[in-house]
Image: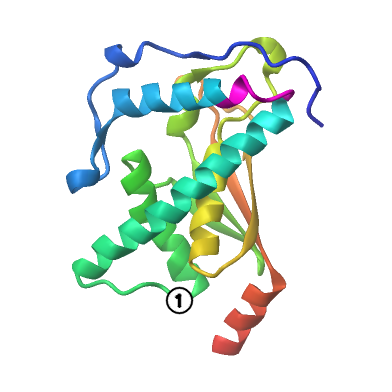
Amino acid sequence: RHRRDRVETIVMASNPLDLPPTPLGRGRSEVAAPAFALLFSEMVQYHQSRSLDISALERALEDAGADVGRRSYESTSYREKASGSKREHRLLPLLQFIQSSCWRSMFGRVADSLEVYDDDEYLLSDRDCLVNRFISVPKDLGDLNCGAFTAGFVRGILHAAGFPAKVSAYYSEPNPAADINGVRTTNILMKFEREVIERESRLG
């Protein structure tokens, strides 16, 4: 359960101008990593100043991510359609589309893994989630996970595609042997509504 502490100032982990100009996305949607870092940091601080506690801040980040996800789904689907691909209407192909095309368009790389937990639960993992890489959270606010933005991003895509689900973000336990520079893996858990699972069963 999140503490109801006063939300203190969150700062960037590094100066965005010192980051390598790695491009994110493709074509006209391409954005440099430093620009993304600066924009995301400003967004976090904007919502932070309007949130009473950590839970409220994470909800605000998730809602912001959901709006971006809806827009990203439409634009990415349009580009894929222009290249000859069709819009996905089945669950697993849609999740693979999110893991690859949508993730690459937004974060500059494919998500590391996609796992099936149960018929209605799937897990998307990113070992070096971009939104957590640039944010330094004070120790007394260690519960804060800016991955809430990515959870919202996924939720927005799923709802826009007609696959409603409850989506949440959490960290894996630290693994010094595997984690990159001490960065914990961000996991996005998707639990789909019954209507989605029943529709998938009917389609075989």
Q: Is residue 147 magenta?
A: no
Range shown magenta: 47-53
* The N terminus: image quadrant: top right
Q: Position of residue 18 (x, y in %)?
A: 28, 12
**Secondary structure mostly taken by the magenta-highlighted segment of the chain:** loop
Element under disc 1: loop
> In this orientation, does residue 78 appear?
yes
Q: Is residue 49 magenta?
A: yes
The total of numbered circles placed on residues is 1
Tell which of 120 and 6 is nearer to you: 6
Q: Position of residue 56 (x, y in %)?
A: 70, 32
Q: Is residue 203 left or right of residue 85?
A: right
The residue sitting at 46% across, 22% down in the picture is 41
Q: Around disc 1, counting alpha carbons within 10 Å, would you say few (fewer than 14), some (14 to 19), or many (20 or more)? A: few
Q: Quadrant of residue 81?
A: bottom left
Q: Residue furthest front?
A: 50
**In the rendered image of this protein, does residue 26 appear above or below residue 74?**
above
Task: Give the residue type that dot 1 points to.
Answer: His
* The C terminus: image quadrant: bottom right
Q: Position of residue 83 (x, y in %)?
A: 19, 67
Q: Position of residue 149 (x, y in %)?
A: 54, 38
Q: Residue under circle 1? A: 89
The residue sitting at 36% across, 40% down in the picture is 107
Q: Quadrant of residue 151?
A: top right
> In this orientation, does residue 128 appear?
no
Q: Is residue 187 left or right of residue 23?
A: right
The residue sitting at 56% across, 35% down in the picture is 147
The residue sitting at 54% across, 23% down in the picture is 46
